[in-house]
């Protein structure tokens, strides 16, 4: 399916300019992979053919790694997306049968076996029925059938090209996928696909972690462990947790490696090893040709202009969401003060980036992944909640000064975030338990005795399936639908508060700050939970939930 976002005119113009230049092949291979990914995203994959035609194998692997792998939801293992894979095959096919064959060969048999396992059923010829149709073909000693009939043309074009140009390689891939007997059982194509998928998913996660990325599994694990952590132990931490230590160790090692390699002249601008020695010859040729040199400088200038336009501020230190929070916004103010201590400030910013990536990869809000600026502001709010917990225990006179001391060294923001996220992530379960207890209370049931149909409906909604279990499984969409139906027994205000709490990112309903006028329509407006005062207000509301039962 084509990208739904409108193409970026600046990106489209840049690609058109590059593709019209004789220097395009060498120039494209010098583009940072992250910038390349932005260009593809901005114009859409279907319109990026002129760019993709010249990328190096290293750049292509990066693009595929960023686009082909998706999780069902943040925190889940990433799996190969068949829909995205078919988009890439369509693009490669459009660049010529030789192009698609070359790319499939260059990507290696592990990639091809995984990709074709999701697209094809492959059977040894002597085991296959002798019936061939428009979607089933004999290739070599194998019978090949596409898994999705509507996609046969794209898959057939790619497979036929690979068989024609690299027959031995293609047969080796088919041999890994073929349906055959073993001495123990019938080993089928679905078994092969599952094994390949599991192996590839693990290798994908491991490779990204080793490259310094925060992965979905890593983020989900980090956030889930905080749910059952002991808050006192979190508060007593004097160093990073083991996962965070390993992350920053890898980052330091990668940076040192890139600096050493750059000094030796063997890496590109992004710190990755170059894989095309011919580029050096192209650069020397352009340097000897003044016209080519001017053209290359012009391309560089356009690329830099595009990159500057892409550098949107992350809003890491933007103002709080409401004036009500501003008076207690200790972390944001303390970070502002630390800007005159660059080494300390940079360390905290590294932590903020790391934590923001954990949020983006490990959880969602309203069923959607958070954008970078929103994730950064959530991290600051959560750290502020963690700091508030410390201040609440220690009864500090100058809160900002106390928080500034907390941020002078590691574990800095990470420790505060871990405390705050523990407090936040327990709210959905606490709300679910309170709600079940409410309608199990004999006094409440006696109050509703004159409405037996309400009690029957409520019991069904909360018990089948068990509402607490639904929340524990993080099936928040289903939980929120249940809560909205519970409006038959609860006041609208309670439904709103419970819905915004029952989410991957529990939030503070604005109506808790200012109740709407009588008769006004309730809205789900909310903000991040940032202080212990917010938390106490929510718990007070839950403790008094019986007042919200509709009589």
Image (spheres, rainbow, N blue to C red):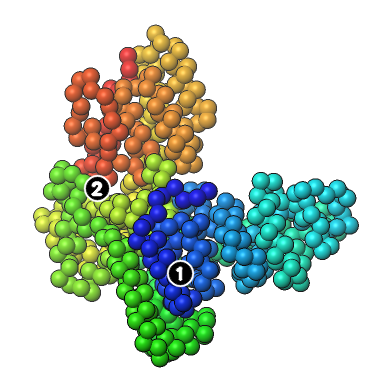
Give SS at disc 2: loop
- Could you classify mark 2 by the number of other residues whose Cα lies within 10 Å: few (under 14), some (14-19), or many (20 or more)? many
- Percent of width and height locating residue 165: 71, 71
- Percent of width and height locating residue 329: 18, 52
In this rendering, does residue 106 appear at all? yes
Marks 1 and 2, the one that precedes in the sequence: 1
- Could you classify mark 1 by the number of other residues whose Cα lies within 10 Å: few (under 14), some (14-19), or many (20 or more)? some
- Percent of width and height locating residue 168: 76, 72
As drawn, the residue found furthest toward the front would be 291
Q: What's the distance in space between the residues labelled 1 and 2, CA to CA? A: 50 Å
State the residue at coordinates (15%, 43%).
Answer: 324
On residue 19, which mark appears? 1
The residue to which callout 2 is attached is 530
Q: Quadrant of the C terminus?
A: top left
Establish if 200 lies above or below 453: below
As drawn, the residue found furthest toward the top would be 450
Give SS at disc 1: helix
């Amino acid at each position: 399916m084509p990208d739904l976002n409108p193409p970026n005119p600046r990106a489209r113009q840049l690609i058109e300019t590059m593709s019209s230049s004789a220097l395009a092949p060498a120039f494209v291979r010098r583009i940072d992979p992250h910038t390349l990914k932005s260009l593809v995203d901005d114009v859409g994959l279907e319109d990026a053919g002129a760019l993709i035609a010249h990328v190096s194998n290293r750049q292509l692997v990066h693009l595929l790694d960023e686009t082909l792998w998706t999780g069902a939801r943040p925190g889940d293992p990433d799996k190969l997306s068949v829909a995205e894979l078919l988009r890439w095959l369509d693009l490669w096919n459009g660049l010529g049968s030789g192009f698609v064959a070359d790319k499939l060969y260059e990507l290696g048999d592990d990639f091809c076996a995984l990709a074709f396992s999701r697209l094809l059923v492959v059977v040894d010829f002597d085991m296959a029925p002798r019936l061939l149709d428009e979607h089933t073909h004999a290739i070599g000693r194998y019978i090949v059938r596409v898994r999705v009939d509507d996609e046969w043309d794209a898959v057939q074009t790619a497979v036929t090209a690979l068989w024609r140009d690299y027959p031995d390689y293609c047969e080796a891939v088919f041999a890994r996928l073929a349906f055959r007997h073993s001495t123990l059982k019938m080993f089928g194509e679905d078994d092969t696909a599952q094994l390949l998928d599991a192996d590839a998913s693990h290798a994908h996660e491991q490779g990204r972690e080793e490259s310094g990325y925060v992965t979905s599994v890593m983020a989900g694990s980090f956030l889930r462990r905080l749910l059952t952590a002991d808050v006192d132990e979190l508060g007593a931490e004097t160093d990073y947790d083991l996962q965070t230590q390993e992350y920053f160790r890898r980052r330091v090692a990668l940076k040192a490696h890139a600096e050493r390699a750059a000094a030796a002249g063997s890496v590109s601008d992004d710190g990755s090893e170059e894989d095309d020695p011919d580029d050096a010859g192209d650069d020397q040729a352009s340097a000897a040709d003044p016209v080519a040199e001017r053209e290359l400088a012009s391309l560089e200038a356009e690329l830099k202009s595009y990159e500057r336009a892409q550098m949107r501020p992350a809003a890491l230190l933007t103002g709080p969401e409401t004036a009500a929070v501003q008076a207690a916004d200790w972390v944001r103010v303390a970070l502002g003060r630390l800007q005159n201590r660059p080494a300390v400030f940079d360390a905290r910013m590294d932590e903020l980036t790391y934590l923001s990536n954990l949020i983006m990869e490990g959880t969602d809000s309203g069923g959607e992944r958070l954008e970078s600026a929103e994730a950064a502001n959530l991290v600051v709010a959560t750290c502020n909640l963690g700091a508030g917990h410390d201040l609440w225990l220690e009864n500090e006179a100058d809160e900002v000064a106390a928080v500034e001391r907390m941020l002078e060294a590691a574990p800095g923001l990470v420790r505060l975030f871990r405390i705050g996220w523990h407090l936040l992530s327990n709210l959905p379960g606490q709300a679910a338990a309170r709600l079940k207890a409410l309608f199990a209370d004999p006094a409440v049931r006696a109050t509703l005795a004159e409405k037996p149909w309400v009690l029957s409906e409520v019991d069904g909604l909360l018990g089948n399936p068990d509402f607490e279990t639904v929340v524990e499984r993080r099936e928040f969409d289903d939980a929120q639908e249940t809560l909205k139906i519970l409006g038959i027994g609860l006041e609208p205000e309670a439904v709103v508060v419970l819905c915004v709490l029952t989410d991957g990112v529990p939030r503070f309903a604005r109506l808790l700050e200012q109740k709407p006028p009588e008769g006004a329509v309730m809205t789900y407006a909310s903000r991040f939970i940032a202080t212990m005062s917010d938390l106490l207000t929510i718990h007070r509301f839950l403790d008094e939930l019986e007042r919200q039962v509709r009589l």
